[in-house]
Amino acid sequence: MALPAWLADAVLYQIYPQSYADSNGDGIGDLNGIESKLDYLAWLGVNTVWLNPCFASPMRDAGYDVSDYYAIDPRYGSRDDLSKLVDSASRKGIRILLDLVAGHTSDQHEWFVRSADDPNDHRYIWADRQDPGFQPSPGTRDGFYLPNFFPVQPALNFGYARMDPSEPWRQSVDAAGPRENRQALRDIMDYWLQTGVAGFRVDMASSLVKDDPGKNETAALWTDLRGWLDHAHPKAALLSEWAQPQVSVPSGFHADFFLHFGNSQAFRSLFHNGAVYDDTYRPRPCFFDPSGAGTGADFLAEWATATSVIGHSGHIVLPTANHDFPRLVAGSRTEEQARAALVFILTWPTLPAIYYGDEIGMQFQPGLPDFEGSVLGPPRVGYNRAGSRTPMQWDADDPEVTYLPPHPSPERPNVAAQQADPESTLNLVRSLIALRKSSPALGTSGAVEILNPGYPFVYRRGDEFTVAVNPSFTPATPEVLVSGELVLGRGATVEDGQLHMDSFSYAVYRD
Ligand code: NOJ
Ligand code: CA
């Protein structure tokens, strides 16, 4: 199975289209707006943009409820605008990935509207009684459908991994409905890849086949699709929202994200804890908590397991945040404190993914209204994702996007001010990206060796770089000798080879 060569050098940047840049003054970000910011993205140095869903949608889950996979939602523009964006981006060396919502559609999608009226249609999962989780038919069909996320998102039928006589509606993965849905996925991917997009981030990639505890049938589905992709579009990349690279990559994905959900503690143990996101990581503060009471051990153990399974067959993506969970600057974590995390992510052998705005230290904004399905219901009652979806802060006084309220403080970080300030978070991120791009040792293929697993976290990249980050308030003098020149850093000193790290410090040395 081929791995598109460009992916190894990808520096990802996630754009939430409605919140990024507005080209026509209606207050909602759009594709032409994104196109107008390509110079900025090229200046920053990112080379792969992942767009959250921009397909036609009633926006009951901000576009993750697709009503037509072949149409761009009018609020974002048209297919031509997307082609134009893809072309202009490619001239600047930037690839565009779309978000493929594979497991469900909107309840307004014509497939579902038809299915709700036709008892012989099996594109969705229909039960003859209302089992827990099933929803009443909105059409003339008798029965109850299975949602995949919110009730407005009926699950596409990819079959069940096993039959159960007490649930006679279960179909096998080879039944006609599941076969049609698999073909539909292929057709959608083919269509957009022909438009020139570089690949997809696949939403809820592990959710397709139901009652599939070992995920074998879900894996088989993706392996099959990957086989087709390798042949039809060998340069395309498939990234999964699965959060288990050791399972998703062998199933056919080129890369998978470490994320904030599931059994994995790798991501939560680094960046999130009870302070900012209630029920995700309780055992202790996260590693990038200023208390210095976290541990990197969970992350390192999972990293070691996942990389030993996937070897060179795929990558792990570490995002700064995304549209579903708090930004790096959230709760009590300040922009200054978040810098150590940015240094870590951009010097680790991961595919780094910057969530728009995190490059300037945009803040998670609590207390916003529930907007376009932003609030997650049980079991996370009350967690509002809108706080991570606020308008990109381009300059001090012109929040061109008004889709959600801009940050209330006039002190809010913004691109214009930070571009002008060589000491800004933005210029730090830019320098880190430039350094990574010019130094293979810092990329995905460079070796990594841990010199100090605690505070500060110190590691070697290749035979060339020593990276040290101290996200803690407490200064530290680890038993690590450092030689070489300081490439970038703050609050780190070396005396007679002995490294000393102040609170919230970071440094990259080159031999
Ligand atoms: C994961 C997406 O990231 C999230 O925003 C969405 O609500 C769910 N999947 C459902 O599609
Ligand atoms: Ca607009």
Image: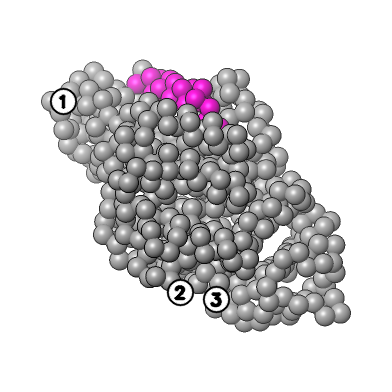
The residue beneath circle 1 is 141
Front one among 332 and 35: 35
Residue drawn at x 26%, y 56% is 370
Q: Residue at x 46, y 47 (%)?
A: 15
Q: Residue at x 38, y 58 (%)?
A: 398
Asked if residue 179 is among those painted magenta in the image, a careful observer would answer yes
- From this viewpoint, is residue 109 visible? yes
Range shown magenta? 177-198
**Quadrant housing the N terminus:** top right
The front one of 201 and 360 is 360
The vertical placement of 40 against 121, above or below, is below
The kind of residue on which mark 1 rests is Arg
Image x and y of residue 354, in percent: 54, 53
Badge 2 element:
loop
List the residue tagged with mark 3. Answer: 290
Q: Residues within 10 Å of mark 3 (few under 14, many from 20)?
A: many
Lateral position of residue 102 relative to residue 312, left or right? left
Q: Amino acid at mark 2?
A: Ser
The numbered mark at residue 332 is: 2
